[in-house]
Amino acid sequence: MGGLPYPELSDWHPKGAVTTSYGLWNDERGAGTRAVIIVNKEGVITYRQTYTPGILPDPADILEEVQKLK
């Protein structure tokens, strides 16, 4: 997925260390819970929404939250 203007995170090993730190690791599935997390320049989480498999985030909602960062 090269060329994206923002960083993305894939957190498979070791056992979802970053996902766990955000409280999103699912031991039953052995994977992280699907989520969108927005972190501001100061490192503060300003938006966090989790999603069940098959449910996609609404891009308009996420864009609205990103625009609040300005």
Image: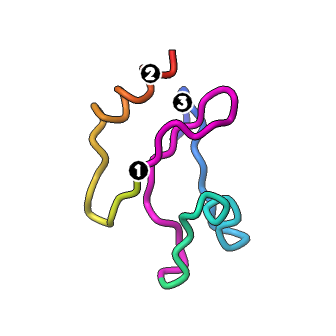
What colouring style does the render use?
A: rainbow
Q: Earlier in the sequence, mark 3 or mark 1?
A: 3
- Mark 2 and mark 1: Cα distance apart in space: 16 Å
Residue 49: mark in rendering: 1
The dot on residue 3 is 3
Element type at marker 2?
loop
Q: CA distance from mark 3 to mark 2?
A: 24 Å
Would residue 26 be counted in the magenta stretch? no
Report the mark closest to the observer, 3 or 1. Answer: 1
Mark 2 packing: few (<14 Cα in 10 Å), some, or many (20+)? Answer: few
Q: Residue furthest top?
A: 70
Q: Are marks 3 and 1 in contact (CB under 8 Å)?
A: no
Nearest to the observer: residue 51 or residue 42: 42
Dot 3 lies on which element? loop
Taking the spot 32% from the left edge, 65% from the top edge, the residue there is: 52
Residue at (63, 37) in percent of width and height: 44
Tag of residue 68: 2
Q: What is the x, y in percent for residue 8?
A: 57, 43
For residue 33, above or below residue 62:
below
Disc 1 element: strand
On the image, the x and y values in percent for residue 11 come to 63, 60
Count of marks placed on residues: 3
Q: Position of residue 4 (x, y in %)?
A: 52, 31
